[in-house]
Image: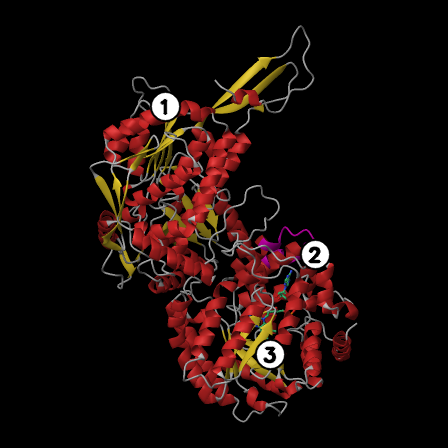
Amino acid sequence: MGALQTEIERRGERIFDLVDRHPESLFSKAGFYQRMMALSMRDEHFKVQLFRFVDVLASLHRGTDIAQHLDEYFADMRNGYAPLIRTGVRAAKIVPWVSGQLLRWNVSGMARQFIAGRNPKDVMKMLRKRRSQGIGFTVDLLGEAVVSEQEANEYASRCLELLEHLGRETRGWTDPLGKNTELFPVVNLSVKISALYSQMNPADPADAIIHLAPKLRPILRRARDLGAFVNFDMESYAHKNATLELFRTLFTETEFRDWPHVGIVIQAYLRDAENDLLDLLDWGRARGTRFAVRLVKGAYWDFEKIKSRQNGWACPVFLQKPESDLNFELITRILLEHESIVTSAFGSHNVRSIAHAQALAEQLGIDRSRFEFQLLYGMAGPVKRALVEMGYRVREYCPVGELLPGMSYLVRRLLENTSNEGFLRAKFSDNVSEDELLRDPAELVAQSATGTRHLEVSGDGASLDTPPGDTYENAPLVNFVYEQNQDRMREALAHVRTQLGQKYPLVINGEKVWTEKTIASINPSSPEDVVGHVAEAGIPEAERAVKAARDAFEKWSRTSFETRCRLLERAADIMHRRRFELSALEVFEVGKAWAEADGDIREAMDFCQFYAHEMRLIGRPRLTQHVLGEESYQHYWPRGVAMIIAPWNFPMAILCGMTTAALVTGNTVIMKPAEQSAVIGAMLMEIFEEAGVPPGVLNYLPGKGSVMGAHLVDHKDVDLIAFTGSREVGLRIWESAGKTREGQRELKRVICEMGGKNAVIIDSDADLDEAIVDIVYSAFGYQGQKCSACSRLIILEEIYPRAMDRLMNAAASLRVGNPEEPGITVGPVIDGAAHKRILEYIDIGKKESRLAFQRGDVPEKGFFIPPTIFANVSPKTRIACEEIFGPVLSVMKARDLDEAFEIANSTEFALTAGFFSRSPANIERAKAEIVAGNVYVNRSCTGAVVGRHPFGGFKMSGGGTKAGGADYLLQFVVPRVVTENITRHGFAPETTPLYRDEFLGPR
Ligand SMILES: Cc1cc2nc3c(=O)[nH]c(=O)nc-3n(C[C@H](O)[C@H](O)[C@H](O)COP(=O)(O)OP(=O)(O)OC[C@H]3O[C@@H](n4cnc5c(N)ncnc54)[C@H](O)[C@@H]3O)c2cc1C
C-alpha cells in the first residue's frame, strides 16, 4: 500500500472517529422525514411515488386536492406499510383541510432541512449559528426554472438584493481560521447562470455571453465593492461550455482581471473535466490573477444519462461511480499542484474524497488554511463538525428561497440521499464498513470489467455504444454543444451559400431532363436570394416518368428485398456523410433553425434504416400456422408505380420516408417534392443515384401539383399515392383516386397524411417550469409550421392567470431571426403566400377574440410573422378550428378537465395532442380520452422519432397510417397467401419450414 493510501486511511478513520463521537442519523430530523427516507430506501416504487408527490405538492392549494393526490400516488401501495398508508389516505379524504395542511407542514419540514431560509433576512439566523460553529457560507438563490427574460431579470435583481443584505449583515465578521484570510471573503454568493438568461442554447455560447455578461457585471461590481466572492455554479452539460467561456470572458475584462475572488465549478463526473480544468489553468496563468475552483462530482448524473441515451449521444458522464470518485481524486491533484494560481474548494460529503484531498495537500506541503471543504446545507452535519475540529476550513452551501418552489432542489437532495451509489447512504444508512468506504477508487475501477472501458465516441460526439434490448437504433442527433459541430455547421452554411442559384434537372429513367420552365426556390429569410432553379415538369414529362416507372417495375419488384434494403442503407450512409451540408441547405431553402434542420436529416436517415429493418422482418414468405397436411405462406407483393407527393415543412424526412417505404417494398417511384423545397428534393435524388438506384426505379419530378400532380393522381398507371400535405389537397386526392379509370389494374391505394389543429391541455397541478418551455417550443418552434404543432392551448381555470403570464413572457423572450444564426427559435414562414394567409388569420383572430400578445420586433426583410397569442378564444371561432400553419396560438380557458377534453376533442382533426399534469388519475384519463393519433404527456407535442413514436393521425388528419411505425410498409404492398395440400394418400411430412423463399423467385 502506498504512503498516500495509508495517510488517506489514517485521516479517514480520524474523520469517522469524530463523526461517531456525535452520532447523528443521516436524516438529522427525526420523525416524518426519517420514516419517509427509510421507506424510500427499502421500496423503489414508494420512493418514486413519494418524490413525485413531493414535486407536485407545491402546486396544490386546496386540502381536497392534496388528499386526492395522496390517494392517487399511494393508495395502491403494496409494501408492509400499505394498511397504514391506506388509513392515512382515508383520513386525509375525511378531513382534507386538516390533513392537507399537516402534509404541507411535514413536507415543508423536509424542505426546511435542505433550504437555509426563505429570504435573505430569514437566512441570517442560520448563518450566524454556523458562524458560531466555525462554518462559513456560500448562498444560492432557489426558484422556479427561468423561462423568460422577465424572470431572468428578476433573478438578477434578487442576487443584488441578497448581496447587499449579506454585505450589511456580516459587517465585522472575521475568518474562522484567521489565516490566509485574503483568499476567502466572508460573503460568498453562488450564481446559477441559466437563471440569468432564458434563451441559452448550446449551439450559440456567444449569444449566451452577450446576454449574460451585462446582467452579471452589476452583480460582480457590487460583489467586488463589498469584498465578496462570486462563484459560477455548474449545471447541465448543455450549458457547461458557455458557462466556462462566460467565466473566462468576464474575468479577462480589464475591470475584473485583477479580481481573485471569483470561482467556477468543475464536475468530476464529466469525462471532459480534466481538459476543462487544464484549459482554465492556462487561462488563469495568462490572466495572472488567482481564481478559485469548486470541485464536485456533479448533481445531474441521471439527467445526463437519460438525455444522452434519448438522443444517441456519447454519455458525457462516467457510468461507474468509482470512475467519478477516481476522477475527483485526479483533479484534486491537479488543483493542488497548481495551488499558486488556483484556490481549491472540495465539494463533497464523501469521507474518502475528503481524506484524499487532505492527505495529498499535506504531502504537497500546502497549508490547510489555503483550501476549503464545502458541503451542502442539511447534509452530512457530523462530517462538517469533524472537519472543523480537525482545523480545516469549512463552508456550507446554503440555498435560500421559498420552501415549496424549492421542491425541485429538495427532490434532487432526496435522490442524492437515497441513491444506492451514494456515500451518505452507504455510511449512515447501510452501515458499510469504514475499510470499504475508504478503499482506493482506482482499485474498484480496475476490478470492474467495464470500469476502465471508455465509450467509443464518433467524431461528432455521437455514441457508438449500442444500448441493449432494442433491435432498431435511431441515428444520433448532432450535439451542437460541441464546438466542432458548431464549426462544421458554419462551414457548411458558408459552402452551401456559394452553391446557391444552381440549376437542377428532372431525372426520368436515369436521365437528366431539362425543361423550358423552371421553378425558382427562394430563401424565405431573404426572398431575393434564389436557392436554386429546378426544372418544372409538365404533362409530357409526367407521362415519360410514368412509363419509365412502369417499365422498371417488373425487374425492381423481383429484385431481392435484401438488395433493396441495402440501397436504403447506402442512402443513409451518404446522408450521414453530407449531413451538415444538407442541414445547411434546409436553413436556406425552408428557414429551419440548425437543430430543426438536423432533426429533419436525422429523421430521413432513420426512415432509410428503419424501413430496411422492417422490410427484413416482413420480406420472407412466412408460414401462417403449423397444421399437419397443409402449408400456407403469407407474403407481400409490391403494388406497382407509386406517386410520392411531399410537403416542404420536413423537406427531406417526409419525402424520403414515403419514397423509401415505396422503394423497399418493391414499388417504383415518381417523387414530387414541394415546389418550395425542390432543391432538397434534388439532393435526395442525387443521394439515391449515388447509392445506385436503377434507372426508372426512382424518378424526380418537381412541378405544379395542380397540373402535373393532379394528372398523375388520375393516371391509370399509377397504383399508389403517398401524400402528406394540406387537408384540402389530401381530400381531393382521396376522392379522385377513388374513381376507376379505363385500363387501371389496381384499386389505387392512397396513403394520406394531412394537418391538425392540435391541442395541449395544462392541468391545474402541472409543472409550469416544464409545460411553458415545451408549449412555447411546440407552438412556435419552426414557426408553428409542423403539422404536429400546438395551435390550441387549453388551460384549467385555476392555473390560467399564472400560466398565461409565464407563457406570454416566454414568447416575448424567444429568439426570432434569420436561422443562419445559431440558437434561433423562430425564423421566417415559408413564402409570401403563407405570410399573407397567416397575417389574414391574425386579423380574423383580432376580430374574433382578444389579442393577448404579439411580438413587435421581427425582421422586416423576409417572411417573418411575429409570434402571436390570442386569449379567451371561443372553441367555435375560425382561429380555434382552422389550421393556420404559423406561429399563432389560441388559448382557451376550461372550467374543469371534462370541459378541457371536450374542447380538445371538438375539432375535425386528430393528429397530436399534449397533456401536462402531475395527477396520475388525470394522466390516465388523458391517455384514454384524448382523441388524437399521437398523445404526448408531460412533453412537447412535436418531434416524433422514427420507430419510437410512429406518427400519424385520423379523422381529417389522415388515413390512420403511422409513418415510422411497424405497420407502415403494409400500405405499400398487397398481401398474398399460397396454400398447398401436402397430403398424399393420407401421408404428410411431420414438419414444414417457417419460411419458403421460393415464392420470392421469378413470377
Ligand atoms: C458545496 C457543494 C456545491 C455543489 N455545487 C454543484 C454544482 O454547482 N454543480 C453540480 O453539478 N454539482 C454540485 N455539487 C455536487 C452535487 O450536488 C452532489 O452533492 C455531489 O455530486 C455528491 O458527491 P459526494 O462526493 O458528496 O458523494 P458521493 O456519494 O461520493 O458521490 C455521488 C456522486 O457520484 C456521481 N455518481 C453517482 N452514480 C454514478 C455512476 N453510476 N457513475 C458515475 N458517477 C456516479 C454523481 O455525481 C453523484 O452525485 C455540489 C456539492 C457540494 C457539496
x, y percent for residue 951:
44, 41
- Mark 2 or 3 closer to N-term? 2
Amino acid type shown at disc 1: Asp
Local SS, label 3: strand
Viewed as shown, does residue 208 lie left or right of 473? left
The alpha-carbon separation of the residues under discs 3 and 1 comes to: 75 Å
Mark 2, other Cα within 10 Å: few <14 / some 14–19 / many ≥20: few
Query: According to the image, label 2 marks what residue?
Result: 81
Mark 3 vs ligand 1: CB below 8 Å: yes
Query: According to the image, label 1 marks what residue?
Result: 551
Amino acid type shown at disc 2: Tyr
Can you tell which mark lies on residue 345?
3
x, y percent for residue 910:
39, 41
Q: Which residues are magenta?
A: 73-95
* Location of the N terminus (image quadrant): bottom right
Amino acid type shown at disc 3: Ala
Mark 3, other Cα within 10 Å: few <14 / some 14–19 / many ≥20: many
Are discs 1 and 2 less than 8 Å apart at CB? no
In which quadrant of the rendered view does residue 953 lie?
Answer: top left
The alpha-carbon separation of the residues under discs 1 and 2 comes to: 73 Å
Local SS, label 2: loop
In which quadrant of the rendered view does residue 98 lie?
Answer: bottom right
x, y percent for residue 673:
32, 39
In the foreground, 548 or 784: 548
- Mark 1 or 2 closer to N-term? 2
